[in-house]
Image (tube, rainbow, N blue to C red):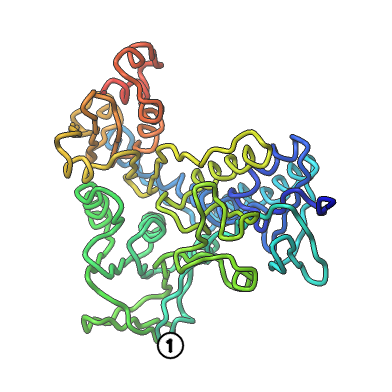
Amino acid sequence: MAKQTYQYDVLYLGCGHGTFDGAAPLAGKGVKVGIIEADKIGGTCPNRGCNAKISLDAPVALQRQLAELNPILTGQTRLNWDANVAHKNDVIGGLPDMICGLLEDSGIDVIHGYGRLVDAHTIRVDAETYTAENIVLATGLHPHRLDIPGREFLHDSTDFMDLPTMPKRLTVIGGGYIALEMASIANAAGSDVTIVLHGDKALRAFYQPFVEQVLSDLTDHGVKILRETTVTAVTHEADDYELTTDTDQTLTADWILDATGRNPNTADLGLDEVGVDYTDAGITVNDHLQTSVDNIYASGDVIAKDQPRLTPTAIFESMYLMHTFAGETTEAIDYPPIPTVVFTSPRIAQVGVTVDQAQADPDHYTVVKNHIPDDWYRQVTQETTGDNALIYDADHHLVGVTEVSAQAADVINTLLPAITFKYGPAELERLVPLFPTIGADAWGEI
């Protein structure tokens, strides 16, 4: 019996990092690739996530550093929000066309429109159908919206990053990455910010004593934090928005950010009709990223997984599928340690074994803590807050790091190879970093 022929060897639904990082090199290996995207090429991260956020945050971090260097540097700096948003748009505006151009230059067909599965090998876009031997679902996430009266008055992070003017009074509902990052930026831009936490903790995946330092810093800068408070309704009165809570408090705001999470994009994809299993947590995959339909795979944030839903995770999955489809591996995906950072001021970042995991298993792990302001290198820039925790296994391999500081992200990146490749004393002795730098300082702490 002749083998079924298809238009594509691999057809991706969605064009975020779960797709394009691996799709381009895959096409370069002679594999026929197509990509279907209904929105901007590049997905969330380049267009309304990481790239936009870090552009808006850069002057915030600089403003903080200048303040720490007082009285060596004196004078006031004011964040011009309108100019900041305009600069952000300049930085990210050309990314979709650039990414699309790179894909097309690799020989990939980029198909614009909303795709829906017809069967295990077919996706329909408008009136056209496209077939493939293998399909990859990489449709990402969308913002969760509270189901309360007045939900139409709530906004998401995309709206926030496009605000033409910064509201005088801004309320943030939620305690995750987006909530705290946007609150930090809005506070630096002069807004009167209130954060509403449903429970008593924020950033639950991080070491809570370090999280409390971030919250304390926000409070010191004028942010109000309400814990164990649930918003039950929002009403619009004249020019104000009134938030009713279960604690009988009424909050008044000019603008409200709903940062209560993000949900997988699984609706209206034809998953039920084709038999692809999924839950509220996302699409179910095995250790080869295959769904319940063996020629349909999933990649990126739409997957139900234990790994953090981050751009680096999606890139790793995309590259793994590239090697799989190119016939270069039949092995299961083997995730490396994946670092994560919250771009607050100060930053909080971690990778590998956490402090809580280590403290729960003292026979196998040792935790060594350092107070950032005690370090001579951090005194150069007059850092006044911050701590880190280094986690070692029984053979004194570094297996985890958590830090809260202005330079936490760079420290984690510096130490990441030691954790990923399990450097021992001999390997560490061979590392000769530039000095004086944060990299040299980080290695010096091991």
Above or below 172: residue 2: above
Question: Camera-side residue: 327 or 48?
Answer: 327
The answer to whether residue 121 is left or right of residue 301 is: right
Above or below 397: residue 337: below
Q: Where is residue 75 in the image (x, y as percent from the top left)?
A: 35, 42
Let me know if residue 281 appears in the view.
yes
Residue at the extreme left of the image, as rendered: 362
Circle 1 — which element?
loop
Name which residue type carries label 1: Ala
Instruction: List the residue tagged with mark 1.
Output: 238
Let me know if residue 165 appears in the view.
no
Q: Report which quarter residue 419 is drawn in.
A: top left
Q: Position of residue 390 (x, y in %)?
A: 24, 32
Question: Camera-side residue: 24 or 303?
Answer: 303
Q: Position of residue 350 (x, y in %)?
A: 33, 41
Question: Camera-side residue: 21 or 294?
Answer: 294
Question: Camera-side residue: 382 or 260?
Answer: 260
The answer to whether residue 267 is left or right of residue 125 is: left
Residue at the extreme front of the image, as rendered: 1
Which residue corresponds to the image point at 21% horizontal and 46% vertical from the top-left? 356
Which residue corresponds to the image point at 74% horizontal and 40% vertical from the top-left? 27
Q: Where is residue 243 in the image (x, y as percent from the top left)?
A: 34, 81
The answer to whether residue 152 is left or right of residue 381 is: right
How many other residues sit within 10 Å of disc 1, few (<14), some (14-19) or many (≥20)?
Answer: few
Above or below 354: residue 114: below
Which residue corresponds to the image point at 22% horizontal and 38% vertical from the top-left? 387
